[in-house]
Amino acid sequence: MHQFRRCVNRYNGNYNMKSFSCLDRFLCISFAQLSYRESLRDIESCLCAMQNKLYHMGIRSPVSKSTSVDANEKSDWRIYADFAQVLINTARDLYVDHDFGVELDETVYALDASTIDLCLSLFPWTRFRKTKGAIKLHTLLDLRGSIPTFISITDGKVHDVNVLDYLFLEPGAFYVMDRGYLDFARLFEITKASAFFIIRSKRNTQLRRIYSSPVDKSTGLRCDQTVVFTGYNASRDYPEKLRRIKFYDEEKKRSFTFLTNNFVLPAIVITQLYKSRWQIELFFKWIKQHLRIKAFYGTSMNAVKTQIWIAISIYVLVAIMKKELKLEASLYTILQILSVTIFEKCPILGVLADEELQNQMHIHHNQVNLFDL
């Protein structure tokens, strides 16, 4: 609560908010995320039905649709973005020793973007195509714990590669990206920051081989080469040597070509790091299916960003809860339990650690669950 109040005071969030505070708004939207509410009217109806329990949940003001609409316009989304960052820092400390499948001491990040389609007539500030609206979630994911460390919410026209200009590059860390981020000048900035990148190469990338290292082709590796760019613009933007690794995936019957500025790790580890990038795809799929970030409670930019940042806060809070309480259940199972016990006055550990309840709430489906280890 101390950290949340600091975020509110930083932007003078409760100014001109007569009854519905920033904390009330955070708790109401959090309730909506946990219980799958679809609209402001839906939130109002459900919370008013539990009027005698709202005080104990921390909601001190009367809940109504009109006050929620006003809060969508007046309550600054940066309050909730800053608070989400506080939670992210806490979660990263808890998951610092989390195993993500590759034995590596350095921090590994996956960078990607996901598009959320919107109605252009309702969200005119999200112009993407001539008759289509969309926003993008540019996300940098720490693979240890699948914790998002950086999120930028833009309209759909912003190209993925532009987000590289806003990253705080961590020396010694690995940044794993797909071909959409192949910009030689920006990649050279990563090298100058003493960080490492792993990225898929495009077919038309002009490279000249300088040296080849031996590889074990039984592992799927086809070559491990030291290369330089031959194109005028590419060689000017990235004047140093690169490492090119080709790998054939027997399962998918596909060949992959990776470029990296790391010449120390074994080639097979480079391919494993890129394969672990799939966690960010699972992260996008998970939050879109289990949190409310595709249907919004307001149409303004402030309302949309607030809802997304509170959804991220809920995701990180559940991840913190799972680690601190040493729960074996997946995030999906924890969310399902919370959705039906949110108004219960009982120890949260007693509910979540009840194996019989967990078995009842577990639903078999084909989706891979994050943290389901």
Image (cartoon, grey):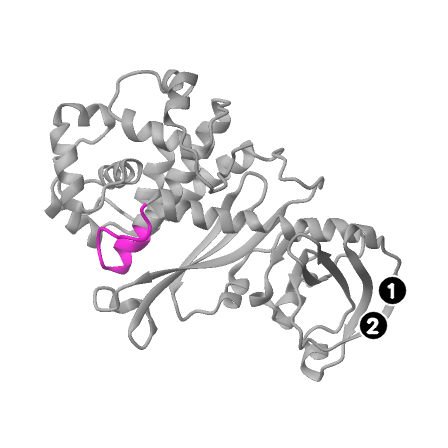
In this view of the protein, can residue 246 be seen by the observer? yes
Q: Residue furthest bottom?
A: 232
In this view of the protein, can residue 174 be seen by the observer? no
140 displayed left or right of 19: right
Q: Which residues are magenta?
A: 292-306
Magenta highlight on residue 298: yes
Q: Amino acid at mark 1?
A: Ser
Residue 175, how many percent across, how many down? Answer: 62, 55
Answer few, some or many: residues within 10 Å of disc 1's Cα (few below 14, many 20 plus, some between 14 and 19): some
The disc placed on residue 290 is: none
The number of discs equals: 2
Element type where label 2 sits in the image? strand
176 displayed left or right of 242: left
Write the residue at 22% across / 51% down: 297
Residue hosting label 2: 209
Write the residue at 55% across / 56% down: 111
Is 201 in front, or is 255? 255
317 displayed left or right of 229: left
- Among the 4 quarters of the image, the one containing residue 52: top left
Magenta highlight on residue 118: no
Q: Are marks 1 and 2 in contact (CB under 8 Å)?
A: yes
Is 162 in front, or is 13? 162
**51 vs 196: above or below:** above
**50 vs 290: above or below:** above
Residue hosting label 1: 212
Residue 319, how many percent across, how many down? Answer: 46, 34
Residue 327, how many percent across, how many down? Answer: 48, 24
Chief secondary structure of the magenta span? loop
Residue 299, how many percent across, how many down? Answer: 22, 59
203 displayed left or right of 118: right
How far apart are the alpha carbons under marks 1 and 2?
A: 8 Å
**Quarter that holds the C terminus:** top right
